[in-house]
Image (cartoon, rainbow, N blue to C red):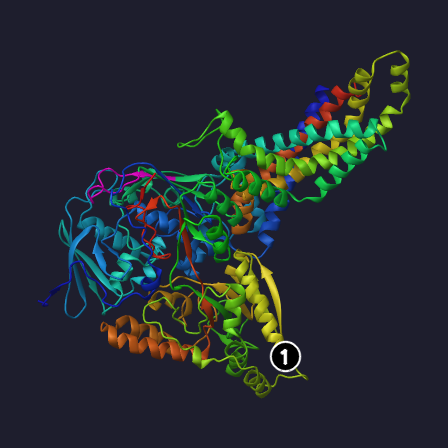
Amino acid sequence: MRTYLLKRLLQIIPTVLGITFVVFVMMRSIPGDPVVSLLGDAYTEENAIKARHDYGLDKPILLQYVIWLGKLVQGDWGTSILSGRPVLKDVMLRLPVTLELIVLSMAVALAIAIPAAIIGALRQNTWADYGATSVAMVGVSIPEFFLGVLLLLVFSVGMGGALPSSGWVYLPGTCQTVVCAAGLWGNTQHVLMPALALGVGRAALLTRLLRASMLEVIRSEYVTTARAKGLSERPVIFKHALKNALIPTVTVMGLQVGFLIGGAIVVETLFAMPGLGTYGIDAIIARDYQQVQGFALITAFAFVVINLIVDLTYTFLDPRIRYT
Amino acid sequence: MHSRHRVSGRGSSALIAFVLLAVLPIAGEAQGPKRGGTLRVAYGNEILGMDFYTTPGYEMAWVAMNVGCGLVSITPDGKFIPEAAESWQVSPDGLLYTFKLKKNVLFHDGNTVDAAAVKFTFDFVLDPANRSNMRQFLGSVHSVEVVDPHTVQIRLKQPYAFLMHVLAVYRMGMIIISPAVTQKYSPEERRAGKPEALVGCGPFKLVEWAKGAHLVMDRFDKYFEPGLPSVDRVVIRTIKDPVTQMAAFKAGEIDFIADLSADHVDTIRAQNPRAHIMTGKETTPMVAMMKVTVPADGKPLSKDRAPHPIFNDIRVRKAVACYGIDRKEIVKIAYKGQATPWLGIIPPGTMDTVDVNHMCPYDRAKAKALLAEAGYGRQKPLTFELMTNTEKSVFNVIATVIKEQMARIGVTANIKLVDKTTWLVTSTQDGAFDMFVEDLASLLTVDQNSYLSASAAAWNHSRHTDTKIDDFYARYAREIDPAKRKVIAKEFQEYSADKLYWNTISGSPFYQVAQPWMRDYVYQAEFKVSYKRVWLDK
């Protein structure tokens, strides 16, 4: 297990580097130039040449990447070309917001998907099953931004500001700004609609997947054996069937993190949240190369680590699985 | 010695047109301003950086004009009023400006704002190494001299009618910077919004800029205007989505929207009948810019120019942009009629504007005839690319209407949708485009527009090479007599409408929205967003 873990941890390095290199090259291949945005109406050819030199943008792309990498290993994530702000500081400021959003969206998704899938599988081809399947279809079909706007109109506008429409209140202990709003209740109010908007689509997908797995598992021999041994239905379903049925679901959950990060861009923009999603999209639009690299690095790292955790979860769900 | 006349507290006598329709001050009620509270402001766009003199964008400027102070400011009706300056005199030849400074103006770090600080500010802005975006407006400044600690003189190379405008309001005005602080901190630290590096003499001091989260300014207790500002704190958040902006406003989460998109005005009005919706005659032009020349050697920004294959021909420009575009229809569809169809290079709300719409009546037959004369028709149909960008939905609506109008005269306009940065780079860096739709800089005077349309300007979008345009700008800027300046402005607008290097479609309306409890905010379009008199009646 230890060897496996070490191998997987080592694999993170080339994976993350590969992703950051691809992003690095792609960003420089698309039209746009951060120097034009940086200089604004003070743009002259002379100023542009000087600025490009100052930021090392006149060097070959490969060399620029090596320089970026060299600074990275020293803990320097670079400085935003446009805002002059240290990338690491801004990423760390925004990371808790997006992490919380992603974790809670996944929690929302599971809270909906597990009961819906179990009901659907146990009562196959009944109204309960059709109901759960239909809800899943609706959930898959509603884009995050649309559901977000609906929630906004109902809970912020329609219900007289029952839930805040925008902004953020940090979880106690996670705020890194000088002026900071933090509190558990405020945080819950702020995260509820974004987590629902992001989680419902995932819930729908997981419901369909888990229902199919459950249908397969509850017909397997070991479940029949468990029932034959006289076990009541609850432990059969939750201890024997669900744990096994969750394996493909957990795999998909890990892969869904990438989609959640993409969805976070939309949801954070809609609810004006100071998260990584808005940070990333602003960086791409402004061609702020350093900022984009920071975003790519942290998201790639998060994706790979979460998928490692997913792989390790298999051993908990199915004790037969061993990593050597 | 020059004889001098005193003009303290007075400025350009020309009435700024936008004021007439635009100023909707939210008058304080009988009980007078209340102290305290937090003003919550929403911006539609992110602040790009915080270096006053290099960061582009209105959002930063709207912060800078509250953190900093200048020598003078401007009222909605175009009068110059003192800020750090107590009084000023201009020599009869218009070449020497003498400013007497107030003695009680302090920077936020407690240091006095004196003549040396003013001179330092000018020297800083004029130094090309500092890449200041105000430098382009100070080309007429010869030198700035300290007469005594509280007197400073600005000497010009030639008369410049708009020096006071530059000082008061171009971009954010000439904000006085602290020599000690500016020398101590790097441009990156200023751009990053480090509060210690951004010490001003304005009513609010910067507390924190956490990009993406908020910008916080606190009341400066030693501000030189007694009793001001009224609010203790200003918190600015960026809410990009107009639906969220409106929801936050409706729920009372924000007190003020600094820039509401025109297509949501009716909704916010319906949702909030007591809201103060402020606007005025448009000072920003919405343009459908045509490229006139291309680099002959294929190198962008090359001085060696060749004719643009389509729009270098004046007949085609006139067919397409003069007779082929129905400006009234565009305004009706894109702005629900709430903008002014316009042709002149000076927007409808800007000083010395003249209506030259009669020069380009919508006339399809004439457009077709001109196209035929230029060799286009069924045998050789005209097709061009119409670039628009994702920043504002109205650009795409206008592009779509133009496409439809072009079809009516047998021309195909292929819409190319790009993101804002791609548009910026393509349009300003001599990239390949035929026409683009965009609203450009808001103008108090057309003098501000020279960097976008003079032949040698870096951002001359159409890349025309007509030096007569430059002459108009130069004559207009040097003419001190407002009546004579008006004549030049009229000639300029007629010439520009005739040549169509600059093709205005309409004015681009600007809206701000305040809650009923936000008092004494004075609307001055994009030019001034000042919170120092604002108080909260709740």
Comparing A148 with A290, the one in front is A148
Direction from residue B250 to residue A320 in the image, left or right: right
Circle 1: element type: loop
- Could you say which quadrant of the image residue A114 lies in? top right
Q: Residue under circle 1?
A: B410
Q: Foreground: B112 or B493?
A: B493
- From which residue to which does the magenta span run? B216-231
Q: In the image, is residue B35 part of the stretch drawn in magenta?
A: no
Q: Is residue B356 visible?
A: yes
The residue depicted at 43 percent of the width and 39 percent of the height is B214
Where residue A81 appears, as percent x and y from the top left, is: 47, 47
Is B219 within the magenta?
yes
Q: Residue at x 56, y 48 (%)?
A: A284
Q: Which corner quadrant of the image does residue B7 belong to?
A: bottom left
Give the residue type that dot 1 points to.
Answer: Gly
How packed mark 1 is, by other alpha carbons closer than 10 Å (few <14, some 14-19, many 20 or more), is some
Could you say where residue A297 lies in the image, as x and y percent from the top left? 59, 38
